[in-house]
Amino acid sequence: MRIMAVFAHPDDEIGCAGTLAKHAARGDEIMLVWTTLGELASQFGDTSHEEVTRIRREHGAWVAGKIGAQYYFFDMGDSRMTGHRDEALQLAKLYATFRPNAVITWSDDHPHPDHRMTAKIAFDAITLARIPKIVNEEGGGEPMPPAPDLSGDDAVESGEDVRRLEAWRDPIRFYQYFAPASPYPEVFVDIEDTLETAAAIASYYRDFYKWQWTDELFREGRAGAGRLAGVKYAERFNLRASHLRARDYLD
Ligand SMILES: [Zn+2]
């Protein structure tokens, strides 16, 4: 299974870190994606964009290493996201490259506009990634990272256009951070096995941002979700699905 976590700012992924680490430990392929560098964090002061990029890549590499994930940064501009098609197209190209079976992102109703726009483009990109002419359209900015090794694929012949992307048409299960007003069904993931990894990632950002949000509060949040779902610690999502194939039976 391949899972892509799409968020606006480094630290947004804390809410699903236990789930991602658990899947990685099972051997699933994980990619963490940030649509911005979160360069407006007050810690950066007047730091140059180049230096912010360097620091954020360090954060991304550390978190990805902790989880056992690949990572990728877009630079759509902290608090400047619009949710327009060009942003969704950039992400659709990454979907066509990584070919996720599931995407995890923000809820639709979070106050921060980047969070809402990230959820919007993450959903829009599912449909754009299904259309061959669109994923190979000019524009959408940046070169994509190397494709994952999808076993069974033939090696590229010399002279073939390696930049041409295949549309990604498999169903993508779309998980969003839990929001009380969401109309979509809730899903809890038992993260008892990976709570420490998730707590370490929260602490890593706590040290950088100097948050007042303590380790105890972090653990209590996961325990609260766990109590609702009959386990010790859990992370909580809403599940939205699209383009589903028929199944043989209910499960
Ligand atoms: Zn954020």
Image: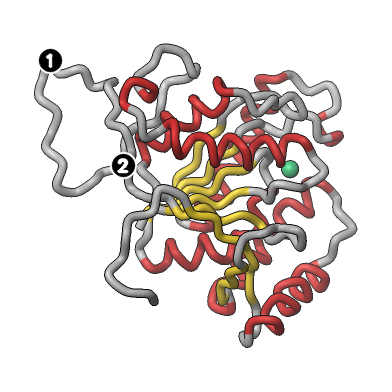
As shown in the figure, which amino acid type bears the numbered disc 2?
Pro
* Placement of 223 over or under 26, stated as above or below: below
Dot 2 or dot 1: first in sequence order is: 2
Asked if the beta carbon under badge 1 is closer than 8 A to the nearest atom of ligand 1, the reply is no
Find the residue positioned furthest to the right. 212
Checking the image for residue 148, the label placed there is 2
* Residue lying at 29% horizontally and 20% vertically, measured from the top left: 163
In terms of secondary structure, where does tag 2 sit?
loop
* Placement of 66 over or under 227, stated as above or below: above
* Residue lying at 44% horizontally and 31% vertically, measured from the top left: 128
> In 3D space, how far apart are the residues under numbered discs 2 and 1 (Cα atoms)?
21 Å
Q: Which residue is mark 1?
A: 159
In terms of secondary structure, where does tag 1 sit?
loop
Residue 57 in which image quadrant:
top right
177 or 220: nearer the viewer: 177
Residue 81 at x, y = what percent? 70, 27
What is the quadrant of the N terminus in the image? bottom left
What is the quadrant of the C terminus in the image? bottom left
Determine the quadrant in which ligand 1 lies: top right
Find the residue positioned furthest to the top. 138
